[in-house]
Image (cartoon, grey):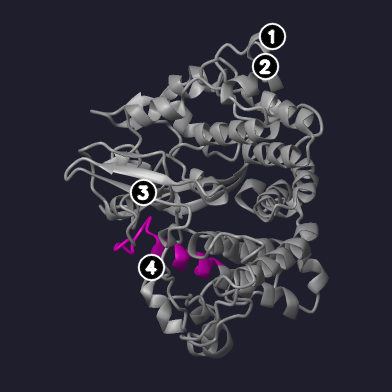
Amino acid sequence: MKKVFLYISCLYLVINTGCNKYLEKEPDNRAMLNTPEKVSQLLTSAYPQANYMAFAESMSDNVADKGAGVVDLTNRDPYFFEDTKENEQDSPEFYWNACYNAIATANIALQACTAAPDSANYRAQRGEALLARAYAHFMLVNFFAAFYDPATAASDPGIPYVTEVENVVFKNYDRKTVAYVYEMIEKDLLEGLPLIKDEAYSVPRYHFNRAAANAFATRFYLFKKEYDKVIQYANAALPSGNVVSVLRPWNTTYRTMTYNELYAVYAKATENANLLLTETSSLWGRNYYSVRYSLDATKQDEIFATPVTGGRWAFEFQTYTAGTNNYLIPKINEYFVKESVNAEIGTPYIMVPAFTTEEVLFNRAEAYTYLNNTTAAIADLNAYASTRIVNYDQSTHAITASKIGTYYNTSSLQEGLIKTILDFKRAEYVQEGMRWFDILRYKIAVTHNAINPAMTMTLSATDLRRVFQIPESAGLAGVAQNPR
């Protein structure tokens, strides 16, 4: 994993120069990308097969020093706001490499789509490749570059936006700017989205289906603060009728499940809330509750405090203890793939819900808030609360402007709504790493305490360490590291 960009370029070299030397036949059924089906098969590798949850969650305000537990550098180093020394699974470097591997795959697929004599038949594959390329770059720029600010984006260093197939082992890349990266993401997003065709997939939720692509657009435009577009794409991603039908049933079906049953459904393609699922090589599934720096009793009480509704979170009833001060919410379930039938070694994987209906609903509510459509924002939040509050009763638990003002002690309904959304999202995505994006967007300071030796560490809104360090290995491609 020391190299910067793939490497699947090696596959490119085999395709173009070496096939005749290997028994005069293709090494596998993808080597000649001469049908839409073969390009689709290749595109299964166009999604980052690595996980950001460990380092993103460990940097956030969702975790504490429990004093004991599994010590892993992908958890320990981010907690202390240090550059992660680990480069294997769940590390920032592993994620960086996986994203560029995915981008390389997408670029090969795009080349095949363009070169095909019947390119019109490859429209769906082209759309997926463009969305996949945009998504991987989007995740990279938000972890490894300064967060998008229209006032500084044109001067803040970005990350390399790679649009060509790599036919050399090492190639120099220019970081350019955050603004440039966002422009390129938007270009790929807007070109690719109309081409997406759900019928092209046997299991649409493992690919950029139309709902997932629109969900991605809501996140992209929320980060850019183009709120009218957030609403436009959210309306395309969510049903026009009863949105509750596509939200996770935490206070009904989920509440009665055992933890094994909940594990089995949370990241499944049959769960309506999951719009895009990606397979990632990760140890987070076995470690996220037992690592030393993670959710403890105090943080659980803080995150699941009685919300503005006045009711109790259903999450509390599906929170388990595994030993002393290890708190587990059954979401992230590992499955282990052996190297062979009789092997004792293999690779652990987890499925990641990359986009969900809940996120789209939150994004729309936030956009409504900033566009002063507070009635619509409150309606979306009430729809969400109706699936999350135990024994939900609209007459008792419905969110109102008055409740918000009292709960948050503010005369600004807009301010109160944003605080409500952030609190709801923090509870919804605990242990999944999503809180980190809100910390970046709202410049929230993070304070971590250590037990032995006793110390307090604060990551301020302007601390340079809020941007993850670009791997040293990227220097082979001329990519400068972030300042410290």
Alpha carbons under labels 4 and 2: distance apart: 46 Å
Highlighted range, magenta: 84-102
Q: Earlier in the sequence, mark 2 or mark 3?
A: 2
For label 4, the SS is loop
Which residue lies under the disc numbered 2? 398
Q: Nearer the viewer, mark 3 or mark 1?
A: 3
Which residue lies under the disc numbered 1? 395
**Of the pair 105 and 36, the residue shown nearer to us:** 105
Q: Earlier in the sequence, mark 1 or mark 4?
A: 1
Alpha carbons under labels 3 and 1: distance apart: 42 Å
Residue 107 in sight: yes
Determine whether 299 is above or below 65 in the image.
above
**Of the pair 449 and 42, the residue shown nearer to us:** 449
Which residue lies under the disc numbered 3? 458
Q: Residue at x 68, y 31 (%)?
A: 412
Rendering coords of residue 57 (x, y %) = 42, 46
Q: How many marks?
A: 4
Decide: few, some or many residues near mark 3? Use Cα within 10 Å; few <14, some 14-19, many ≥20: few
Decide: few, some or many residues near mark 1? Use Cα within 10 Å; few <14, some 14-19, many ≥20: few
Alpha carbons under labels 4 and 3: distance apart: 15 Å
Decide: few, some or many residues near mark 4? Use Cα within 10 Å; few <14, some 14-19, many ≥20: few
**Amino acid found under the numbered disc labelled 2:** Ala
Q: Earlier in the sequence, mark 3 or mark 1?
A: 1
- Residue 250 lies left or right of residue 205; in this view the side is left
- Residue 379 lies left or right of residue 479; in this view the side is right
Contact between labelled residues 2 and 1, with CB atoms less than 8 Å apart: yes
> Image quadrant of residue 474?
bottom left
